[in-house]
Amino acid sequence: MQVPRMIAGVVLLAACSSARPAAVPTSAPATPPASNDAVKASTEAVAFPSTYAPRPSRTTLIRNATILTAAGPTIQNGSLLMQDGKVVAVGASINAPAGAEIIDAAGKWVTPGIIDTHSHMGVYSAPGIAALQDGNEMTNPVTAEVWAEHSVWPHDPQFALALAGGITTAQLLPGSGNLIGGRGVTVKNVPARTVQEMKFPNAPYGLKMACGENPKRVYGGRGRAPSTSMGNMAGYRAAWIRAAKYRDDMAKWEKEGSDPAKRPMRDLQLETLALALDSEILIQNHCYRADEMVQMIDLAREFGYKIKSFHHAVEAYKVRDYLAKEDICASMWSDWWGFKLEAYDGIQENIPLVHEAGACAVVHSDDAQGIQRLNQEAAKAWTAGRKAGINLTRDDVIKWITINAAKALGIEKSTGSLEPGKMADVVIWSGDPFSVYTKAEKVFIDGALIYDRNDPRHQPKSDFMLGITPEVVR
Amino acid sequence: MIRFTFSRAAVALTLVAALSNGASAQQQPVAITNARIHTVSGPVIERGTLVMQNGRITAVGANVTAPAGARIIDAAGKTVTPGLLDSSTGLGTVEIGADAPSNDQSSSTDRITAALNPLDNLNPFATAIPVTRVEGITRAVVAPNPGASFIAGQGLLIDLGSLNANVSVTRNPIAMYAVLGEQGAERTGGTRATNLLRLREVLQDTRDYATNRNAFDAGSRRDYALSRLDLEALIPVVRGEVPLAVTVNRASDILNALRLGREMNIKLILQGAAEGWMVAREIAAAKVPVVTNPLGNIPTFDALGITFENAARLHEAGVTLAIASFDTHNSRNLKQNAGHAVAYGLPHDAALRAVTLTPAQIWGVADRYGSLETGKDADVVIWSGDPFELTTTVDHVFIRGVEMPTETRQQKLLERYRSAVTFD
């Protein structure tokens, strides 16, 4: 049983936020960025490449289902055809090709595979002992040089548990103890021996940044910078200044003939930061407070980069106009609040309000339990919104855990909705996915049946779980 | 004589709190009509009426007439249940979790604090209380978290209807809280055996003290492992009057706890019991109740066998079961926890009972609360539908007959930002 969420006692500063938002300034980078081509060329494109291969799949037709496509209106009594790992057709009536496996899904619901933009599976693995605390390289406030995938333990039993909750894709992120915590990696949730076997092919990397209480607590507690919110900002700015210099030095070297003898020494930290400057790597920014999110937007403007998604964004509702205007996703919880001062103003209507403003609303977990029921978390937010007069449909709500999440990870062209040509990442649910009583029954990844609640042959179990729990206890 | 001073002080404290209940008294009778009523103690009434007067339920049934002058609430299409009881929270003792000065739920002292009572921590104006009660939870166990000591102190049961600075106590104390398993071991020298050794020592010292107070006062008794106040607080435990609520998860640790309970002849409550399903028969035979959160399945070395089906399997084996959130700010998710247990095999009526009547029985207040029966406190919730369903909303919450305000800090934030932002 979990003990209630407890965070070590820390000294916090009071916040005061009662001012209403002013007009949103228009966005324009201060200076046109130099070319990053040289940095890109200097990185080893093949470093730690994905070796993911779709599992063998059969041509499969799901029939008679209620289908939430995340791309259009609900299809009643609909069919979905998967072939060669792709969605081939979705609609009211589809003929089965010869030899196709046919699944009668009468009474069941079908959605795209669920995507979590914020997970620490593999980096904070179960069973949660000290040997598995691999998520936060808290030895320097800027550790852009570390890659979460180098911590990922593929035998973390949490992957299989999330799969049973319909999760087909997740971004595995470093923690938020640092200002810039390192690269995150997006994976397909398949059982594997190595993280490379899980890496989502061609998905962009994420760069984890963190606002607010965590970095200043971690480092301030050690008597070093940052110990304040202004120290946090100075830390990001110093890092971006060095990154821009690295990019410029590399560009200059290339312009001057790319003489190998004169090449600036490769710097892993600055390389990642330089690539993030022009969105080769997507900024995933842990940030709770509204005013701090706007500080981060201004910081991005100062250095000419783009924030892809704020994470946690407990006060996103206060600056939802900024998020819409800047086209920044907000990855949020449905109802977490109060565990820190920066989470004190959390309201259950946060997600629907962000959605209503036209911004990209995402339900994320940051939690080994929550990732198993993102559909339920979305349902709670939907209900709170309805009570506040924000009338959304299931077709809106499903986007929070599928296509919008895919957008936040830069993979929306390949997955996140049920449209012809996309990866056949699909969940068949026992009923309405927004009911507490509904469970994922079958989960397909690239058209292959990876999980089946009613068939033990399709219930992956990590090496760790073998032989440690009795199969039958009386 | 010192002991009497303390005992009287403790009794007086409880009485004062009980007499100065915070909630205002019910003025007008209320009749809820045409509702689907889950009485919990009896069958569901499909189209019934429930009457509340002077803070009590005065009638419930299919053929009940509203008294003259009553406020009538037509609840056609709605569902009525008792207010829910969360059997483990820090409500009223935590404002900001990470802010030590505003968080009184756990102490950093490593001394045994059996005499600690959260009543001294309680603030009925804590913002989490209205946030919780507008979601249909009307009673809550307030328990200390284990700090550095393996015996954290006592818990009490409050209602969430206090609208002034007085805590509205239902019963105090209801249990003594201790930790076993990994959590106990790390607080008592690193092993499970030292943990049990310390617990035995404490209980035996208490027994000795209880029968040799005069010798203790005269300085002619051996030293004890804990202080006088803590010994006093543990006397009701060794007499079997107050249960020892032990957090314990591994099956072997649960069996150790049951054995210790028999050996010491004390009443036990198991908290957590993640691997309880593996020893469900033994738990049922020992007639020891379990308080658990069914929403857990991440394995640890303290509970490799943890499963979503724990609650259902315990129930099936005949174990007395209460469902709790083990949370404070999100105690409101108790409903989701119960629904989740249903999704994994617990019958719906058993799940509702696990957040109403069963915990009322476990905590010794079932004569006043826990079901919709004539004479019981009028803690009543009107829901738009199934209380556990995620799309259900709460229409009305009554605590002891008084309708609770819908105002919360979160509601005020929503109102401020609902339309204040201008969009292009």
Image: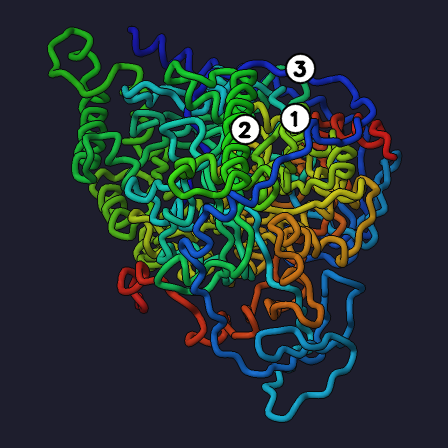
Q: Position of residue A331 (x, y in %)?
A: 63, 42
Question: Can you tell which of label 3 and label 1 is closer to the viewer?
Answer: 1
Quadrant in which the N terminus of chain B is drawn: top left
Residue that numbered label 3 is attached to: A16
Q: Nearer the viewer, residue A45 or B149?
A: A45
Q: Are marks 3 and 1 on the same chain?
A: yes
- For the point 67% across and 39% down, the residue is B135
Which residue is labeled 1 in the image?
A: A302
Coordinates of residue B273 in the picture (x, y in percent): 37, 48
- Give me the chain letter of mark 2: A
Q: Amino acid at mark 2?
A: Trp
Residue A239 higher or lower than B318, as above or below: above
Q: What kind of colouring is applied to the model shown?
A: rainbow
Q: Given contact means CB atoms under 8 Å apart, are the residues at marks 3 and 2 in contact?
A: no
The residue lying toward the viewer, choosing from A113 and B42, is: A113
Side of A329 relative to B159 (left or right): right
Locate the C terminus of chain B by quadrant.
top right
The residue shown at (53%, 21%) is A232
Task: Kindly report the distance in space between the C-alpha atoms of the residues bearing marks 3 and 2.
Answer: 29 Å
Q: Chain of mark 1?
A: A
* Label 3: which secondary element: loop
| Residue under pointer 2 | A240
Given contact means CB atoms under 8 Å apart, are the residues at marks 1 and 2 in contact? yes
Q: Dividing the picture into quarters, in which one does residue B234 lie?
A: top left
For the residues labelled 1 and 2, the Cα–Cα distance comes to 10 Å
A59 vs B140, nearest the viewer: A59
Q: Are marks 1 and 2 on the same chain?
A: yes
Q: Could you tell me if residue B402 is visible in this image?
A: no
